[in-house]
Image: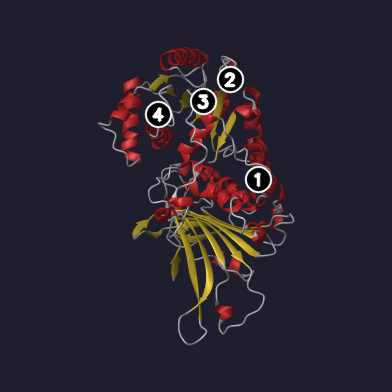
Amino acid sequence: MALDVSVSTRDGEIIQPAQQRPAPPCAIVIFGASGDLTHRKLIPALFDLFQAGLVTKHFAVLGFARSPLSNDDFRRTARDGISHYTADAVASDKSWEEFSKCLHYISGQFNEPASYQLLRERLEKIDAGHGTQCNRLFYLATPPELFEVITGQLGAAGLNQRPDEHAFVRLVIEKPFGVDLETARHLNGSVQHAFKESQVFRIDHYLGKETVQNILAFRLANGIFEPIWNRNFIDHVQLTVAETVGVERRGGYYEQIGAFRDVVENHMLQLLSIVAMEPPVVFEAEPVRDEKLKVLKALRRIPPEQTGEFTLRGQYTSGSVDGRPVSSYRGEEKVAPDSWTETFVVMRLQIDNWRWAGTPFYLRHGKRMPKRATEIAIQFKRAPQMFFPGEERLEPNVLAMRIQPDEGISLRFGAKVPGPTMQLQEVDMNFMYGSSFRDVEQSDAYERLLLDAMLGDRTLFTRADEVEQAWAWAQDIQAGWSDRPNNVHFYPAGTWGPGWADAFIERDGRQWRKM
Ligand code: BG6
Protein backbone atom coordinates (compact mmCIF):
# COMPACT_ATOMS: atom_id res chain seq x y z
CA MET A 1 0.00 0.00 0.00
CA ALA A 2 1.48 3.39 -0.87
CA LEU A 3 0.40 6.80 0.33
CA ASP A 4 1.54 9.49 -2.05
CA VAL A 5 2.79 12.64 -0.48
CA SER A 6 2.68 15.73 -2.59
CA VAL A 7 5.54 18.09 -1.99
CA SER A 8 4.61 21.64 -1.33
CA THR A 9 6.97 24.54 -1.38
CA ARG A 10 6.30 28.06 -0.21
CA ASP A 11 3.39 29.37 -2.34
CA GLY A 12 3.93 26.38 -4.62
CA GLU A 13 7.20 27.86 -5.79
CA ILE A 14 10.54 26.16 -5.77
CA ILE A 15 12.85 27.95 -3.39
CA GLN A 16 15.71 29.05 -5.60
CA PRO A 17 19.23 29.77 -4.46
CA ALA A 18 19.89 33.53 -4.47
CA GLN A 19 20.73 33.19 -8.14
CA GLN A 20 21.93 30.48 -10.44
CA ARG A 21 25.42 31.67 -11.28
CA PRO A 22 26.56 31.09 -14.85
CA ALA A 23 30.11 29.90 -15.42
CA PRO A 24 32.75 32.58 -15.91
CA PRO A 25 34.49 32.87 -19.30
CA CYS A 26 36.57 29.73 -19.70
CA ALA A 27 38.40 27.46 -22.16
CA ILE A 28 38.10 23.76 -21.39
CA VAL A 29 40.84 21.53 -22.75
CA ILE A 30 39.68 17.91 -22.91
CA PHE A 31 42.54 15.43 -23.07
CA GLY A 32 41.18 12.24 -24.59
CA ALA A 33 38.75 14.16 -26.78
CA SER A 34 38.15 11.30 -29.20
CA GLY A 35 37.15 8.94 -26.38
CA ASP A 36 33.89 7.58 -25.14
CA LEU A 37 33.56 9.79 -22.05
CA THR A 38 33.91 12.96 -24.12
CA HIS A 39 31.12 12.06 -26.51
CA ARG A 40 28.89 10.20 -24.11
CA LYS A 41 29.02 12.62 -21.18
CA LEU A 42 31.16 15.74 -21.45
CA ILE A 43 30.01 17.30 -24.72
CA PRO A 44 26.28 16.59 -24.07
CA ALA A 45 26.64 18.10 -20.59
CA LEU A 46 28.36 21.22 -21.94
CA PHE A 47 25.75 21.57 -24.66
CA ASP A 48 22.99 21.42 -22.05
CA LEU A 49 24.76 24.07 -19.96
CA PHE A 50 25.09 26.20 -23.08
CA GLN A 51 21.40 25.86 -23.89
CA ALA A 52 20.50 26.74 -20.31
CA GLY A 53 22.63 29.89 -20.58
CA LEU A 54 24.96 28.64 -17.85
CA VAL A 55 28.01 28.90 -20.03
CA THR A 56 28.28 32.15 -21.90
CA LYS A 57 29.51 32.75 -25.38
CA HIS A 58 32.92 33.52 -23.85
CA PHE A 59 33.51 29.84 -23.70
CA ALA A 60 35.38 27.26 -25.78
CA VAL A 61 36.26 23.59 -25.77
CA LEU A 62 39.59 22.50 -27.15
CA GLY A 63 39.70 18.77 -27.72
CA PHE A 64 43.17 17.22 -27.52
CA ALA A 65 43.88 13.65 -28.67
CA ARG A 66 46.20 11.67 -30.89
CA SER A 67 43.74 11.13 -33.75
CA PRO A 68 44.31 13.52 -36.63
CA LEU A 69 40.90 15.25 -36.75
CA SER A 70 39.94 18.67 -38.07
CA ASN A 71 37.73 21.07 -36.13
CA ASP A 72 34.87 20.04 -38.40
CA ASP A 73 35.44 16.33 -37.77
CA PHE A 74 35.42 16.99 -34.03
CA ARG A 75 32.21 19.02 -34.28
CA ARG A 76 30.58 16.29 -36.34
CA THR A 77 31.45 13.55 -33.82
CA ALA A 78 30.32 15.84 -31.01
CA ARG A 79 26.95 16.30 -32.68
CA ASP A 80 26.62 12.56 -33.32
CA GLY A 81 27.39 11.95 -29.65
CA ILE A 82 24.66 14.31 -28.51
CA SER A 83 22.10 12.72 -30.83
CA HIS A 84 23.15 9.24 -29.84
CA TYR A 85 23.46 9.60 -26.09
CA THR A 86 20.85 12.20 -25.22
CA ALA A 87 17.28 12.96 -26.08
CA ASP A 88 18.25 16.35 -27.55
CA ALA A 89 17.54 16.96 -31.21
CA VAL A 90 20.44 18.97 -32.53
CA ALA A 91 20.59 18.65 -36.28
CA SER A 92 18.93 21.91 -37.23
CA ASP A 93 18.96 23.59 -33.89
CA LYS A 94 20.16 27.16 -33.87
CA SER A 95 21.79 26.74 -30.48
CA TRP A 96 23.85 23.87 -31.88
CA GLU A 97 25.14 26.24 -34.58
CA GLU A 98 26.25 28.67 -31.91
CA PHE A 99 27.63 25.96 -29.64
CA SER A 100 29.58 24.21 -32.39
CA LYS A 101 31.50 27.43 -33.07
CA CYS A 102 32.95 27.02 -29.57
CA LEU A 103 34.36 23.56 -30.33
CA HIS A 104 37.97 23.24 -31.49
CA TYR A 105 40.38 20.38 -31.84
CA ILE A 106 44.11 19.89 -31.72
CA SER A 107 45.92 16.67 -32.46
CA GLY A 108 49.01 15.98 -30.36
CA GLN A 109 51.15 13.44 -28.54
CA PHE A 110 50.54 13.32 -24.80
CA ASN A 111 54.23 12.93 -23.99
CA GLU A 112 55.73 15.44 -26.43
CA PRO A 113 56.67 18.91 -25.21
CA ALA A 114 56.13 20.31 -28.74
CA SER A 115 52.43 19.36 -28.56
CA TYR A 116 52.06 21.47 -25.42
CA GLN A 117 53.67 24.46 -27.14
CA LEU A 118 51.07 24.10 -29.89
CA LEU A 119 48.41 23.78 -27.22
CA ARG A 120 49.55 27.02 -25.63
CA GLU A 121 49.40 28.83 -29.00
CA ARG A 122 45.91 27.51 -29.70
CA LEU A 123 44.76 28.59 -26.25
CA GLU A 124 46.09 32.08 -26.85
CA LYS A 125 44.15 32.26 -30.11
CA ILE A 126 41.04 31.00 -28.35
CA ASP A 127 41.44 33.63 -25.63
CA ALA A 128 41.62 36.28 -28.35
CA GLY A 129 38.74 34.87 -30.43
CA HIS A 130 36.30 33.83 -27.66
CA GLY A 131 37.20 36.24 -24.87
CA THR A 132 37.93 33.37 -22.47
CA GLN A 133 40.17 35.68 -20.43
CA CYS A 134 42.97 33.11 -19.97
CA ASN A 135 40.76 30.99 -17.66
CA ARG A 136 41.59 27.32 -18.23
CA LEU A 137 40.15 24.03 -17.16
CA PHE A 138 42.24 20.99 -18.13
CA TYR A 139 40.05 17.88 -18.11
CA LEU A 140 41.78 14.49 -18.10
CA ALA A 141 39.38 12.13 -19.84
CA THR A 142 42.16 9.73 -20.82
CA PRO A 143 43.12 6.28 -19.54
CA PRO A 144 44.68 6.71 -16.06
CA GLU A 145 48.18 5.72 -17.16
CA LEU A 146 48.35 9.08 -18.95
CA PHE A 147 47.43 11.24 -15.93
CA GLU A 148 50.99 11.58 -14.72
CA VAL A 149 52.39 12.18 -18.20
CA ILE A 150 49.90 14.94 -18.98
CA THR A 151 50.13 16.76 -15.65
CA GLY A 152 53.94 16.57 -15.88
CA GLN A 153 53.91 18.03 -19.39
CA LEU A 154 51.46 20.76 -18.43
CA GLY A 155 53.77 21.70 -15.59
CA ALA A 156 56.89 21.61 -17.75
CA ALA A 157 55.21 23.84 -20.34
CA GLY A 158 54.16 26.28 -17.62
CA LEU A 159 50.51 25.70 -18.49
CA ASN A 160 49.80 25.02 -14.82
CA GLN A 161 50.47 28.71 -14.12
CA ARG A 162 47.88 31.45 -14.34
CA PRO A 163 48.67 33.58 -17.38
CA ASP A 164 47.53 36.60 -15.40
CA GLU A 165 46.60 37.23 -11.80
CA HIS A 166 42.85 37.41 -12.44
CA ALA A 167 42.73 34.13 -14.34
CA PHE A 168 42.30 30.58 -13.05
CA VAL A 169 43.88 27.31 -14.12
CA ARG A 170 42.25 24.11 -12.87
CA LEU A 171 42.69 20.41 -13.40
CA VAL A 172 39.79 17.95 -13.47
CA ILE A 173 40.62 14.24 -13.10
CA GLU A 174 38.39 11.26 -13.63
CA LYS A 175 38.59 8.12 -11.52
CA PRO A 176 40.37 5.76 -10.94
CA PHE A 177 42.67 7.67 -8.61
CA GLY A 178 45.11 4.82 -8.29
CA VAL A 179 44.38 1.15 -7.74
CA ASP A 180 45.68 0.97 -4.17
CA LEU A 181 47.17 3.21 -1.51
CA GLU A 182 50.62 3.30 -3.04
CA THR A 183 49.48 4.21 -6.56
CA ALA A 184 47.01 6.77 -5.19
CA ARG A 185 49.77 8.46 -3.19
CA HIS A 186 52.05 8.38 -6.17
CA LEU A 187 49.38 9.92 -8.41
CA ASN A 188 48.50 12.59 -5.87
CA GLY A 189 52.20 13.34 -5.52
CA SER A 190 52.72 13.82 -9.24
CA VAL A 191 49.56 15.87 -9.67
CA GLN A 192 50.52 18.06 -6.72
CA HIS A 193 53.99 18.48 -8.13
CA ALA A 194 52.47 20.49 -10.98
CA PHE A 195 49.21 21.78 -9.46
CA LYS A 196 48.22 23.06 -6.04
CA GLU A 197 45.53 20.97 -4.34
CA SER A 198 43.22 23.98 -4.61
CA GLN A 199 43.48 23.71 -8.40
CA VAL A 200 42.56 20.01 -8.50
CA PHE A 201 39.01 18.73 -8.98
CA ARG A 202 38.71 14.92 -8.66
CA ILE A 203 35.43 13.67 -10.06
CA ASP A 204 33.37 10.95 -8.44
CA HIS A 205 30.31 11.25 -10.63
CA TYR A 206 28.06 9.92 -7.84
CA LEU A 207 28.50 13.23 -6.03
CA GLY A 208 27.01 15.02 -9.04
CA LYS A 209 23.79 13.00 -8.92
CA GLU A 210 20.78 15.05 -7.81
CA THR A 211 19.62 12.35 -5.46
CA VAL A 212 22.99 12.11 -3.75
CA GLN A 213 23.02 15.86 -3.17
CA ASN A 214 19.50 15.49 -1.86
CA ILE A 215 20.78 13.30 0.97
CA LEU A 216 22.58 16.40 2.19
CA ALA A 217 19.45 18.51 1.80
CA PHE A 218 17.35 15.87 3.53
CA ARG A 219 19.70 15.63 6.48
CA LEU A 220 20.73 19.25 6.85
CA ALA A 221 17.57 21.16 5.91
CA ASN A 222 15.04 19.19 7.96
CA GLY A 223 15.09 19.37 11.73
CA ILE A 224 13.04 16.26 12.36
CA PHE A 225 15.54 13.64 11.18
CA GLU A 226 18.73 14.77 12.87
CA PRO A 227 17.73 13.73 16.42
CA ILE A 228 17.07 10.16 15.30
CA TRP A 229 20.01 9.88 12.90
CA ASN A 230 22.21 7.78 15.14
CA ARG A 231 22.86 4.49 16.90
CA ASN A 232 20.06 5.06 19.42
CA PHE A 233 17.33 4.85 16.80
CA ILE A 234 18.88 3.20 13.76
CA ASP A 235 19.32 -0.56 13.76
CA HIS A 236 21.43 -0.69 10.62
CA VAL A 237 21.94 0.89 7.20
CA GLN A 238 21.95 -0.90 3.84
CA LEU A 239 23.60 0.55 0.77
CA THR A 240 22.90 -1.19 -2.50
CA VAL A 241 24.30 -0.50 -5.95
CA ALA A 242 22.80 -3.16 -8.20
CA GLU A 243 23.38 -3.09 -11.94
CA THR A 244 21.86 -5.22 -14.68
CA VAL A 245 24.77 -4.56 -17.01
CA GLY A 246 27.79 -6.81 -17.11
CA VAL A 247 31.27 -5.54 -17.86
CA GLU A 248 30.29 -4.64 -21.44
CA ARG A 249 33.43 -4.07 -23.47
CA ARG A 250 35.55 -3.19 -20.45
CA GLY A 251 36.63 -6.73 -19.61
CA GLY A 252 40.34 -5.82 -19.84
CA TYR A 253 39.97 -3.02 -17.30
CA TYR A 254 37.58 -4.89 -15.03
CA GLU A 255 39.82 -7.95 -14.80
CA GLN A 256 42.44 -5.79 -13.07
CA ILE A 257 40.00 -3.91 -10.88
CA GLY A 258 36.93 -5.95 -9.85
CA ALA A 259 33.70 -4.76 -8.26
CA PHE A 260 35.27 -3.61 -5.00
CA ARG A 261 37.70 -1.16 -6.54
CA ASP A 262 35.40 -0.19 -9.41
CA VAL A 263 32.41 0.92 -7.34
CA VAL A 264 32.61 0.11 -3.61
CA GLU A 265 35.89 1.81 -2.72
CA ASN A 266 34.87 5.09 -4.35
CA HIS A 267 31.17 5.64 -5.14
CA MET A 268 29.82 3.63 -2.22
CA LEU A 269 32.25 5.01 0.33
CA GLN A 270 31.25 8.50 -0.82
CA LEU A 271 27.58 7.62 -0.29
CA LEU A 272 28.39 6.19 3.10
CA SER A 273 30.34 9.30 4.12
CA ILE A 274 27.44 11.57 3.19
CA VAL A 275 24.93 9.46 5.10
CA ALA A 276 27.13 9.11 8.17
CA MET A 277 28.96 12.43 8.44
CA GLU A 278 28.40 15.08 11.10
CA PRO A 279 26.76 18.30 9.95
CA PRO A 280 29.51 20.65 8.74
CA VAL A 281 29.95 24.00 10.46
CA VAL A 282 29.06 25.74 7.19
CA PHE A 283 28.07 24.29 3.86
CA GLU A 284 31.34 24.95 2.09
CA ALA A 285 33.85 22.71 0.39
CA GLU A 286 36.44 22.31 3.13
CA PRO A 287 34.12 21.80 6.13
CA VAL A 288 32.01 19.31 4.14
CA ARG A 289 35.06 17.39 2.99
CA ASP A 290 36.55 17.49 6.49
CA GLU A 291 33.44 15.78 7.86
CA LYS A 292 33.43 13.14 5.11
CA LEU A 293 37.09 12.45 5.81
CA LYS A 294 36.35 11.92 9.52
CA VAL A 295 33.88 9.16 8.60
CA LEU A 296 36.50 7.43 6.48
CA LYS A 297 38.97 7.71 9.35
CA ALA A 298 36.43 6.16 11.72
CA LEU A 299 35.76 3.18 9.42
CA ARG A 300 36.94 0.14 11.28
CA ARG A 301 39.74 -1.68 9.47
CA ILE A 302 39.00 -5.25 8.50
CA PRO A 303 42.20 -7.21 9.23
CA PRO A 304 43.23 -9.46 6.32
CA GLU A 305 42.56 -12.63 8.34
CA GLN A 306 38.97 -11.47 9.01
CA THR A 307 37.93 -10.61 5.44
CA GLY A 308 36.07 -13.95 5.28
CA GLU A 309 33.91 -12.83 8.17
CA PHE A 310 33.13 -9.29 7.05
CA THR A 311 33.13 -9.54 3.25
CA LEU A 312 31.92 -11.93 0.58
CA ARG A 313 32.71 -12.01 -3.12
CA GLY A 314 30.82 -13.42 -6.07
CA GLN A 315 31.14 -13.76 -9.83
CA TYR A 316 28.33 -14.20 -12.35
CA THR A 317 27.92 -17.27 -14.46
CA SER A 318 25.66 -17.32 -17.52
CA GLY A 319 22.01 -16.61 -16.94
CA SER A 320 19.30 -14.30 -18.07
CA VAL A 321 18.74 -10.59 -17.45
CA ASP A 322 15.63 -8.72 -18.61
CA GLY A 323 14.47 -11.91 -20.30
CA ARG A 324 17.60 -12.14 -22.45
CA PRO A 325 20.31 -14.81 -22.12
CA VAL A 326 23.69 -13.39 -21.11
CA SER A 327 27.14 -14.90 -20.94
CA SER A 328 29.15 -15.65 -17.84
CA TYR A 329 31.80 -13.18 -16.66
CA ARG A 330 34.46 -15.66 -17.72
CA GLY A 331 32.94 -15.70 -21.19
CA GLU A 332 33.21 -11.89 -21.61
CA GLU A 333 35.67 -10.32 -24.04
CA LYS A 334 39.20 -9.90 -22.62
CA VAL A 335 38.39 -11.87 -19.46
CA ALA A 336 40.50 -14.92 -18.50
CA PRO A 337 38.51 -18.17 -18.74
CA ASP A 338 39.68 -19.05 -15.22
CA SER A 339 39.32 -15.54 -13.77
CA TRP A 340 38.55 -15.07 -10.06
CA THR A 341 37.78 -11.36 -10.34
CA GLU A 342 34.73 -10.45 -8.27
CA THR A 343 31.65 -8.95 -9.92
CA PHE A 344 29.67 -8.94 -6.68
CA VAL A 345 30.58 -7.90 -3.14
CA VAL A 346 28.82 -7.65 0.17
CA MET A 347 30.39 -6.19 3.30
CA ARG A 348 29.54 -5.44 6.87
CA LEU A 349 31.18 -2.23 8.04
CA GLN A 350 31.42 -0.48 11.38
CA ILE A 351 31.99 3.17 11.98
CA ASP A 352 33.79 3.64 15.27
CA ASN A 353 32.46 6.95 16.53
CA TRP A 354 29.85 8.13 19.02
CA ARG A 355 27.10 8.50 16.45
CA TRP A 356 27.40 5.05 14.90
CA ALA A 357 29.09 2.69 17.36
CA GLY A 358 27.35 -0.68 17.10
CA THR A 359 25.21 0.21 14.04
CA PRO A 360 26.40 -1.87 11.09
CA PHE A 361 26.45 -0.56 7.54
CA TYR A 362 25.85 -3.34 5.01
CA LEU A 363 27.11 -2.71 1.49
CA ARG A 364 25.98 -4.72 -1.52
CA HIS A 365 27.13 -4.20 -5.08
CA GLY A 366 26.93 -6.42 -8.11
CA LYS A 367 26.79 -6.59 -11.86
CA ARG A 368 24.19 -8.67 -13.70
CA MET A 369 21.63 -8.35 -10.93
CA PRO A 370 17.92 -8.80 -11.80
CA LYS A 371 17.25 -5.09 -11.45
CA ARG A 372 19.08 -1.77 -11.63
CA ALA A 373 18.70 -0.13 -8.25
CA THR A 374 20.85 2.16 -6.15
CA GLU A 375 19.39 2.71 -2.75
CA ILE A 376 20.27 3.70 0.80
CA ALA A 377 17.95 2.17 3.37
CA ILE A 378 17.97 3.34 6.96
CA GLN A 379 16.32 0.68 9.07
CA PHE A 380 15.08 1.90 12.44
CA LYS A 381 14.83 -0.09 15.64
CA ARG A 382 11.52 -1.63 16.57
CA ALA A 383 9.07 0.00 18.95
CA PRO A 384 10.12 -0.92 22.50
CA GLN A 385 6.89 -2.73 23.27
CA MET A 386 4.46 -4.68 21.10
CA PHE A 387 0.75 -4.14 21.61
CA PHE A 388 -0.97 -5.65 18.61
CA PRO A 389 -1.41 -9.21 17.43
CA GLY A 390 1.03 -10.07 14.66
CA GLU A 391 3.07 -6.93 15.28
CA GLU A 392 6.27 -8.91 15.48
CA ARG A 393 5.80 -9.86 11.82
CA LEU A 394 5.60 -6.23 10.77
CA GLU A 395 8.70 -4.94 9.00
CA PRO A 396 10.53 -2.31 11.10
CA ASN A 397 10.37 1.32 9.93
CA VAL A 398 12.58 1.91 6.92
CA LEU A 399 13.55 5.16 5.29
CA ALA A 400 14.63 4.32 1.76
CA MET A 401 16.43 6.85 -0.41
CA ARG A 402 16.28 5.73 -4.00
CA ILE A 403 19.25 7.17 -5.82
CA GLN A 404 18.30 5.67 -9.18
CA PRO A 405 16.07 4.83 -10.98
CA ASP A 406 12.58 5.89 -9.68
CA GLU A 407 14.38 8.60 -7.74
CA GLY A 408 12.70 9.44 -4.47
CA ILE A 409 12.41 8.77 -0.76
CA SER A 410 9.94 6.56 1.02
CA LEU A 411 9.17 5.93 4.64
CA ARG A 412 7.69 2.60 5.59
CA PHE A 413 5.61 2.27 8.70
CA GLY A 414 2.85 0.10 10.14
CA ALA A 415 -0.81 1.12 9.78
CA LYS A 416 -4.12 -0.36 10.77
CA VAL A 417 -5.93 -2.19 8.01
CA PRO A 418 -9.50 -0.81 7.87
CA GLY A 419 -11.94 -3.22 9.49
CA PRO A 420 -13.20 -4.50 12.81
CA THR A 421 -9.92 -6.08 14.01
CA MET A 422 -6.63 -4.48 14.93
CA GLN A 423 -4.78 -5.87 11.98
CA LEU A 424 -1.59 -4.17 10.87
CA GLN A 425 0.14 -3.80 7.56
CA GLU A 426 3.18 -1.91 6.24
CA VAL A 427 2.46 1.18 4.17
CA ASP A 428 4.79 3.61 2.40
CA MET A 429 4.82 7.37 2.39
CA ASN A 430 6.41 8.28 -0.89
CA PHE A 431 8.17 11.27 -2.35
CA MET A 432 8.96 10.84 -6.02
CA TYR A 433 11.02 13.33 -7.97
CA GLY A 434 9.09 12.56 -11.13
CA SER A 435 5.76 13.65 -9.69
CA SER A 436 6.82 16.33 -7.21
CA PHE A 437 9.12 18.16 -9.57
CA ARG A 438 7.32 17.36 -12.78
CA ASP A 439 8.37 20.55 -14.54
CA VAL A 440 11.96 20.52 -13.43
CA GLU A 441 14.35 18.64 -15.63
CA GLN A 442 16.97 16.65 -13.73
CA SER A 443 20.41 17.50 -14.92
CA ASP A 444 23.06 14.93 -15.54
CA ALA A 445 25.79 14.56 -12.89
CA TYR A 446 28.40 15.83 -15.34
CA GLU A 447 26.52 19.07 -15.96
CA ARG A 448 26.58 19.93 -12.30
CA LEU A 449 30.20 18.90 -11.85
CA LEU A 450 31.48 20.73 -14.91
CA LEU A 451 29.63 23.88 -13.89
CA ASP A 452 31.00 23.65 -10.34
CA ALA A 453 34.54 23.14 -11.65
CA MET A 454 34.21 26.28 -13.81
CA LEU A 455 32.78 28.16 -10.84
CA GLY A 456 35.58 26.88 -8.60
CA ASP A 457 33.28 25.15 -6.09
CA ARG A 458 35.05 22.02 -4.81
CA THR A 459 32.31 20.76 -2.46
CA LEU A 460 31.31 17.88 -4.74
CA PHE A 461 34.85 16.81 -5.60
CA THR A 462 37.06 14.47 -3.61
CA ARG A 463 40.16 15.75 -1.86
CA ALA A 464 43.55 14.02 -1.94
CA ASP A 465 43.34 13.00 1.73
CA GLU A 466 39.87 11.46 1.26
CA VAL A 467 41.14 9.40 -1.65
CA GLU A 468 44.16 8.18 0.30
CA GLN A 469 42.13 7.43 3.42
CA ALA A 470 39.70 5.31 1.39
CA TRP A 471 42.57 3.33 -0.09
CA ALA A 472 44.26 2.99 3.31
CA TRP A 473 41.07 1.36 4.61
CA ALA A 474 40.72 -0.80 1.50
CA GLN A 475 44.22 -2.19 1.52
CA ASP A 476 43.64 -4.68 4.35
CA ILE A 477 40.70 -6.14 2.46
CA GLN A 478 42.75 -6.37 -0.70
CA ALA A 479 45.50 -8.10 1.25
CA GLY A 480 43.04 -10.55 2.81
CA TRP A 481 41.53 -11.37 -0.56
CA SER A 482 44.87 -11.84 -2.26
CA ASP A 483 45.67 -14.51 0.34
CA ARG A 484 42.59 -16.45 -0.79
CA PRO A 485 42.06 -15.38 -4.41
CA ASN A 486 39.67 -18.23 -5.24
CA ASN A 487 37.28 -17.58 -2.41
CA VAL A 488 34.69 -16.24 -4.84
CA HIS A 489 31.18 -17.73 -5.03
CA PHE A 490 29.34 -18.07 -8.31
CA TYR A 491 25.85 -16.75 -8.97
CA PRO A 492 23.78 -17.03 -12.13
CA ALA A 493 23.43 -13.70 -13.98
CA GLY A 494 20.00 -12.26 -13.22
CA THR A 495 19.97 -13.24 -9.53
CA TRP A 496 20.76 -11.30 -6.35
CA GLY A 497 24.18 -12.88 -5.92
CA PRO A 498 25.34 -16.16 -4.39
CA GLY A 499 23.10 -17.80 -1.79
CA TRP A 500 25.86 -17.15 0.73
CA ALA A 501 25.06 -13.44 0.49
CA ASP A 502 21.73 -14.09 2.22
CA ALA A 503 23.39 -16.18 4.90
CA PHE A 504 25.92 -13.35 5.36
CA ILE A 505 23.29 -10.92 6.66
CA GLU A 506 20.83 -13.45 8.09
CA ARG A 507 23.38 -14.63 10.65
CA ASP A 508 22.99 -11.14 12.17
CA GLY A 509 19.20 -11.62 12.28
CA ARG A 510 18.67 -9.22 9.35
CA GLN A 511 17.70 -9.47 5.71
CA TRP A 512 18.63 -7.78 2.47
CA ARG A 513 16.04 -5.36 1.21
CA LYS A 514 13.91 -6.69 -1.62
CA MET A 515 14.23 -4.31 -4.54
C1 BG6 B 1 31.58 3.58 -12.92
C2 BG6 B 1 32.04 2.15 -12.97
O1 BG6 B 1 32.46 4.36 -12.16
O2 BG6 B 1 30.29 3.63 -12.34
C3 BG6 B 1 31.06 1.31 -13.76
O3 BG6 B 1 33.32 2.10 -13.58
C4 BG6 B 1 29.68 1.44 -13.16
O4 BG6 B 1 31.46 -0.06 -13.79
C5 BG6 B 1 29.31 2.91 -13.06
O5 BG6 B 1 28.77 0.76 -14.02
C6 BG6 B 1 27.99 3.09 -12.34
O6 BG6 B 1 27.57 4.42 -12.51
P1 BG6 B 1 26.03 4.77 -12.65
O7 BG6 B 1 25.99 6.26 -12.71
O8 BG6 B 1 25.53 4.10 -13.88
O9 BG6 B 1 25.38 4.21 -11.43
- Alpha carbon distance from label 4 to label 3: 18 Å
Q: Which mark is residue 34?
A: 4
- Please tell me which residue is depicted at 54% across the width and 65% down the height of the picture: 512
Counting from the top left corner in percent of width and height, residue 199 is at 60, 27
On screen, residue 396 versus residue 295, left or right, reads: left
Query: Which label sits in the foreground, 2 or 1?
Result: 1
Secondary element at image label 1: helix
Image quadrant assignment for residue 507? bottom right
**Mark 4–mark 3 contact, CB under 8 Å?**
no
**Disc 2 or 3, which lies upstream in sequence?**
3
Q: Which mark is residue 160?
A: 2
- Alpha carbon distance from label 3 to label 1: 26 Å
Depicted 372 relative to depicted 43: above or below: below
Type of the residue with mark 2: Asn
**Disc 4 or 3, which lies upstream in sequence?**
4
**Disc 1 or 4, which lies upstream in sequence?**
4
Residue 343 visible somewhere in the drawing: yes
The answer as to whether callout 3 falls within 8 Å of ligand 1 is: no
Q: Which mark is residue 292?
A: 1
Q: Which residue is mark 3?
A: 137
- Please tell me which residue is depicted at 65% across the width and 35% down the height of the picture: 464
Type of the residue with mark 4: Ser
